[in-house]
Amino acid sequence: MTINKLDEFDNEEDFDVVTFNIDNIKSKIPTYKSEKLCEMIVADQYFECYKEMSACCMEELAKRREAGDVFNFEQFINDSMKELPVINLIIPDLGTVLRSLIGQVKK
């Protein structure tokens, strides 16, 4: 018999909770390497979330470019996006799916 790991906990206090604090991340952005900033931008573009964080990362990369940093962040971001699989969020028509399933069952 398999026991669900969640059954071992009596309440939510037993879980380690990780919080996402945008202000904490924004304060650390100047300390991050350019690659990490690019990865954060890619995460925003890929999952379409974290817009505020992504904008802060872009501002930091622009500041670095103005200060003479030659890191090609545009290319890094483009190459990273190309490596990720395409997310297809098109929901199929339920009637078509059911007819397909019924057709397979009748065979």
Image: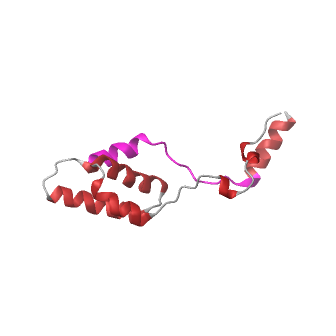
Q: Position of residue 78 (x, y in %)?
A: 33, 47
Q: Quadrant of residue 4?
A: top right
Task: Check the image and report above or below for 14 versus 52.
Answer: above
Out of 67 and 30, give the one closest to the viewer. Answer: 30
Instruction: Identify the image quadrant of the N terminus.
Output: top right
Structure colour scheme: secondary structure
Q: Quadrant of residue 60?
A: bottom left
Q: Position of residue 46 (x, y in %)?
A: 45, 52
Q: Residue furthest right?
A: 106
Residue range (magenta): 75-95
**Count of labels shown?**
0
Out of 13 and 28, give the one closest to the viewer. Answer: 13
Q: Is residue 97 magenta?
A: no
Out of 106 and 8, give the one closest to the viewer. Answer: 8
Instruction: Identify the image quadrant of the C terminus.
Output: top right
In the picture, measured across the screen, residue 107 lies left or right of residue 12, that is: right
Q: Residue furthest left?
A: 68
In the picture, measured across the screen, residue 28 lies left or right of residue 21, that is: left
Out of 1 and 102, give the one closest to the viewer. Answer: 1
In the picture, measured across the screen, residue 93 lies left or right of residue 29, that is: right
Q: Position of residue 37 (x, y in %)?
A: 33, 52
- Residue located at (55% from left, 49% from top): 88
Q: Is residue 87 magenta?
A: yes
Task: Check the image and report above or below for 49 versus 34.
Answer: below
- Residue located at (40% from left, 63% from top): 24
